[in-house]
Image: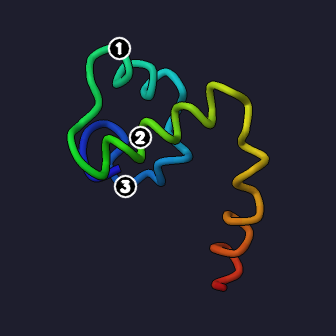
């Protein structure tokens, strides 16, 4: 996250309450807003397991 309380946090690690706030009050414009919306939908629908392979590859430097 490039700003705010969670500056420096990877978007997928943002708490759902923070994403809900953005959803209610308006997502930022542009790429960041699209990414936050996507993360919100993933978390809202319980699809975090879909990201496990991606997170593992990032941790392993692939």
* Comes first in the chain, label 3 or label 2: 3
Residue 15 location (% of width, % of height): 53, 32
Separation of disc 3 and disc 2 at Cα?
14 Å
Separation of marks 3 and 1 at Cα, in angstroms: 22 Å
Q: Earlier in the sequence, mark 2 or mark 1?
A: 1
Which residue, as the protein is rendered here, is positioned at the far left? 29
Whether 22 is drawn above or below 14: the answer is above
The residue tagged 3 is: 8
Q: Nearer the viewer, mark 3 or mark 2?
A: 2
In the figure, is residue 57 to the left or right of 34? right
Find residue 24 and name its label. 1
Q: How is the image coloured?
A: rainbow
Q: Is residue 34 above or below residue 22?
A: below
User: Regarding mark 2 in the picture, which secondary structure is present there?
Assistant: helix
User: Which residue is at a point 68% across and 65% down the rendered structure image?
Assistant: 54
Q: Residue at x 35, y 50 (%)?
A: 1
Q: Residue at x 41, y 47 (%)?
A: 35
Label 3: element kind: loop
Say whether residue 45 is left or right of residue 24.
Answer: right
Q: Mark 1 packing: few (<14 Cα in 10 Å), some, or many (20+)?
A: few
Circle 2 residue: 36
Quadrant in which the C terminus is drawn: bottom right
Q: Residue at x 37, y 55 (%)?
A: 8
């Amino acid at each position: 996250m490039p700003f705010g309380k969670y500056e420096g946090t990877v978007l997928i690690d943002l708490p759902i309450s923070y994403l809900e706030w953005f959803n209610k009050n308006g997502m930022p414009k542009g790429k960041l807003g699209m990414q936050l919306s996507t993360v919100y939908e993933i978390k809202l629908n319980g699809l975090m397991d879909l990201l496990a392979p991606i997170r593992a590859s990032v941790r392993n430097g692939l």
